[in-house]
Image (cartoon, rainbow, N blue to C red):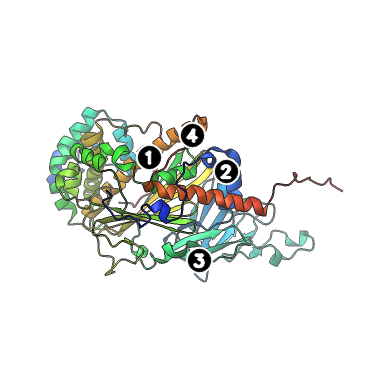
């Protein structure tokens, strides 16, 4: 007997018309599939590369290494205040334009122009080529033809996205669809106190999204994080979501959250009792200036609501917590079985040093959980790669996993239809 | 030796080495400590947590003096060691093996 109402079809999976059969994770263990995903997904979809707060003034910039999409991009606020993006390549000899010390490391800063380290070519913040060393030595040369290569760049609710596909014309808002529309108006801009974590994870990017897109694991894997009586109780009850949502390639899960604060103080650790904070964030929620949450947050309007987790395809997760803070996850593939994970926590700036300490407890708790999750995934990847078993069951609380893998396979399939495998390109001999 | 912490917290001076300014440094000290060392720090600092929060609540982040900053860092370290002492019974997160996750951005105190 479910604790929370399921759709009339009897399950969320069937409600969303998703197959209920066993699933294969071949898409997560095949180097060939990953190579296809790079072009089919990472070079064709809107990728979240940061927040507008990272570009506080005109001339502020940062770079992002998009290994999966085979490029590096510059994101900059130009002299007119507009956020733009360019491929991070000098038009002269192809040197990486913006970097310090280590070419593969991301950098940020503020500048009036971009100057190539190699031959001193300079570009305005709008990408225009403004200076060429010994320009008269070049042949039939027009600076106007040699500006930086633009990348499509749009902003939604302060989140900066780029899209490397110049043929795909869907605007960002249309791509993000109804789930994003339902969140619009949430005061993300007030939550500017940022703690960001980064980890190299030995697992396919989708497998780590899987780990955060279901909470079926939480009462078991994280059992020891709760004091034992509470932990036993949680394992006995198991996990059920309040609601699931699926719209196009994107999805969300809405969860209960009885820990901010807990019904009974004995349910949480001594430090949490004293600091009134924990995994779900500081219990005393700060004012964020809205009377009611946007309709897409806690869509069931359930009184026990605690957290909504949105999966924006392909690799951006947004978690909005009841005590008025949010968390983002990004998964940046570096090979078929490795990726860089980024977890970033955003709080309203603390009013005093005690509130800062409460936030520290939430941050450190996130880290403890992420360490458990990350290591478990490496164990999953290695055994999936053994192919000792190739099909696996998924329950109704894991519906988002089915949807994610099916979506990734669909993108690859559609890409293959557009670009059928042809004979290898022959390089013409020099004339 | 000059006092590092506010006078009210003179009893915690022997643990002032835990007043480290970054989460990464506090976590590294946790991993480099024995359970006995973590327990000793916890047993000294935890009973003082209420007094510390009352003290810290009086200061905005821009108004913390050097001793106040160290007090905040010291109790941030108590947060860091609370997991091994209250839950794990070992300095490392169980089953975390060689996994690491590092702070790359954190608000300066």
Label 3: which secondary element: helix
Tag 4 or tag 2, which sits nearer the N-term? Answer: 2
Marks 3 and 1 on same chain:
yes
Name the residue tied to disc 1: A373
- The answer to whether marks 2 and 3 mark residues whose Cβ atoms lie closer than 8 Å is no
Q: Nearer the viewer, mark 2 or mark 4?
A: 4
- Residue in front for this viewpoint, A231 or A83: A231
Residue at figure coordinates x 44%, y 65% from the top left:
A178
Q: Distance between the Cα atoms at labels 4 and 3?
A: 36 Å
The subunit carrying tag 3 is A
Which residue in the rendered view is the most extreme toward the right? A431
Q: Distance between the Cα atoms at labels 2 and 1?
A: 22 Å
Say few, some or many: other residues with alpha carbon within 10 Å of mark 2 (under 14 / 14 to 19 / 20 or more): many
Q: Distance between the Cα atoms at labels 1 and 4?
A: 16 Å
Name the residue tied to disc 2: A34
Tag 1 or tag 3, which sits nearer the N-term? Answer: 3
Name the residue tied to disc 4: A384
Q: Which mark is residue A290?
A: none
- The answer to whether marks 4 and 3 mark residues whose Cβ atoms lie closer than 8 Å is no
Name the residue tied to disc 3: A174
Q: Nearer the viewer, mark 3 or mark 1?
A: 3
Say few, some or many: other residues with alpha carbon within 10 Å of mark 4 (under 14 / 14 to 19 / 20 or more): some
Residue at figure coordinates x 51%, y 68% from the top left:
A82
Tag 3 or tag 2, which sits nearer the N-term? Answer: 2
Marks 1 and 4 on same chain:
yes
- Residue A416 lies left or right of residue A174; in this view the side is right
Please provide percent x and percent y for residue A84: 54, 64
Label 4: which secondary element: helix
């Amino acid at each position: 007997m479910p604790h929370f109402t399921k759709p009339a079809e009897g399950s969320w999976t069937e409600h969303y018309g998703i197959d209920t059969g066993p699933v294969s994770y071949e898409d997560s263990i095949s180097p060939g599939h990953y190579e296809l995903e790079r072009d089919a997904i990472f070079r064709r979809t809107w990728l979240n590369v940061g927040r507008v707060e990272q570009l506080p003034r005109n001339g502020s910039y940062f770079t992002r290494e998009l290994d999966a999409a085979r490029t590096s991009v510059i994101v900059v606020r130009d002299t007119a205040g507009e956020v733009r993006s360019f491929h991070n390549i000098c038009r002269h000899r192809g040197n990486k334009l913006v970097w310090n010390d280590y070419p593969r490391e991301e950098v940020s800063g503020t500048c009036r122009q971009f100057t190539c380290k190699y031959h001193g070519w300079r570009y305005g913040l709008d990408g225009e080529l403004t200076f060429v060393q010994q320009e008269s030595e070049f042949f039939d040369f027009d600076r106007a033809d040699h500006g930086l290569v633009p990348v499509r760049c749009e902003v939604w609710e302060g989140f900066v996205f780029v899209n490397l596909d110049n043929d795909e014309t869907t605007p960002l808002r249309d791509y993000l669809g109804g789930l994003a529309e339902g969140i619009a108006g949430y005061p993300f801009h007030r939550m500017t106190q940022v703690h960001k974590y980064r980890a190299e994870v030995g697992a396919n990017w989708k497998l780590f999204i899987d780990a955060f897109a279901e909470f079926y694991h939480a009462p078991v894997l994280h059992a020891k994080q709760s004091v034992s009586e509470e932990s036993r109780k949680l394992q006995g009850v198991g996990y059920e979501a309040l609601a699931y949502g699926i719209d196009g390639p994107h999805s969300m899960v809405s969860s209960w959250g009885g820990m901010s604060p807990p019904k009974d103080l004995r349910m949480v650790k001594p430090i949490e009792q004293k600091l009134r904070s924990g995994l779900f964030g500081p219990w005393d929620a700060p004012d964020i200036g809205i009377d009611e949450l946007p309709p897409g947050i806690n869509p069931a309007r359930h009184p026990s609501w605690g957290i909504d987790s949105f999966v924006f395809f392909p690799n951006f997760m947004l978690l909005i917590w009841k005590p008025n803070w949010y968390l983002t996850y990004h998964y940046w593939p570096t090979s078929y079985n490795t990726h860089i994970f980024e977890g970033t926590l955003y709080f309203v700036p603390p009013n005093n040093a005690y509130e800062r300490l409460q936030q520290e407890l939430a941050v450190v708790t996130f880290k403890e959980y992420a360490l458990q999750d990350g290591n478990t995934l490496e164990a999953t990847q290695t055994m999936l790669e053994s192919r000792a078993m190739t099909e696996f069951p998924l329950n109704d609380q894991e519906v988002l996993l089915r949807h994610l893998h099916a979506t990734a396979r669909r993108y690859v399939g559609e890409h293959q239809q557009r670009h059928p495998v042809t004979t290898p390109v022959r390089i013409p001999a020099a004339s | 030796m000059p006092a590092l912490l506010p006078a009210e917290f003179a009893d915690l001076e022997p643990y002032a080495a835990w007043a480290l300014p970054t989460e990464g440094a506090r976590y590294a000290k946790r991993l480099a400590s024995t359970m006995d060392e973590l327990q000793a720090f916890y047993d000294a600092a935890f009973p003082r947590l209420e007094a510390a929060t009352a003290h810290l609540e009086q200061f905005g982040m821009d108004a913390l003096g050097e001793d106040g900053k160290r007090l905040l860092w010291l109790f941030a370290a108590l947060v860091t060691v609370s997991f091994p002492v209250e839950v794990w019974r070992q300095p490392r997160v169980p089953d975390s093996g060689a996994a690491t996750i590092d702070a790359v951005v954190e608000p300066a105190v």
